Image (cartoon, rainbow, N blue to C red):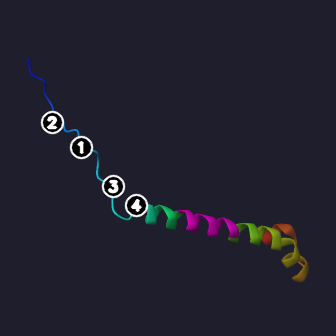
Amino acid sequence: MSKSGPPRTDAQPEVPARASLVLASLIVVAAVANLNLSVANVALPAIGRAFDSSQTALNL
């Protein structure tokens, strides 16, 4: 009885050397983008008052 398919290997898949660095960089980028969005959302009412603008105009 024979099995078809690729030969079985017990070796673990190789992890790229800088995988943790790439992951950390992506997490930092996502955090900075989220922080930027939060700051903009907090500042929108003050920006609207400074330019005498409505909330609808600010959302555009």
| Residue at the disc numbered 4 | 19
Q: Amino acid at mark 3?
A: Val
> What whole-number distance in Å separates the C-alpha atoms at marks 2 and 3?
21 Å
Q: Disc 3 designates what residue? A: 15
Marks 4 and 2 close (CB-CB < 8 Å): no
Part of the protein shown in magenta: 27-35
Quadrant of image for the C terminus: bottom right
Front disc: 4 or 2: 4
- Horizontal and vertical percent position of residue 42: 82, 69
Q: Are marks 4 and 1 in contact (CB under 8 Å)?
A: no
Crowd rating for badge 2 (residues with CA inside 10 Å; few <14, some 14–19, many 20+): few
Tell me where residue 5 appears, x and y as whole percent: 15, 32
Question: Is residue 60 shown to the viewer in this render?
Answer: no
**According to the image, label 1 marks what residue?**
11
- Work out whether mark 4 precedes mark 2 in sequence or the reverse, and give the earlier one: 2
Picture coordinates of residue 55, whole percent (x, y): 85, 68
**Is 7 left, or right, of 47 in this rendering?**
left
Say which label, 2 or 3, has the lower sequence index: 2
Left or right: 8 in relation to 16? left
Question: Closer to the N terminus: mark 4 or mark 1?
Answer: 1
Classed neighbour count for the residue bearing mark 3: other residues with Cα under 10 Å, few (<14), some (14–19), many (≥20): few
Query: In the picture provided, is 53 more to the left or to the right than 4?
Result: right
Could you tell me which secondary element the residue under label 1 belongs to? loop
Q: Is residue 28 left or right of residue 52?
A: left
Mark 3 secondary-structure assignment = loop
Mark before the other along the chain sequence, 1 or 2: 2
Question: Residue under circle 2?
Answer: 6
For badge 2, the amino acid type reads Pro
1, above or below 4, in the image: above
The residue under the point 80% across, 72% down is: 58
Kindly indicate the quadrant of the structure image that contains residue 31. bottom right
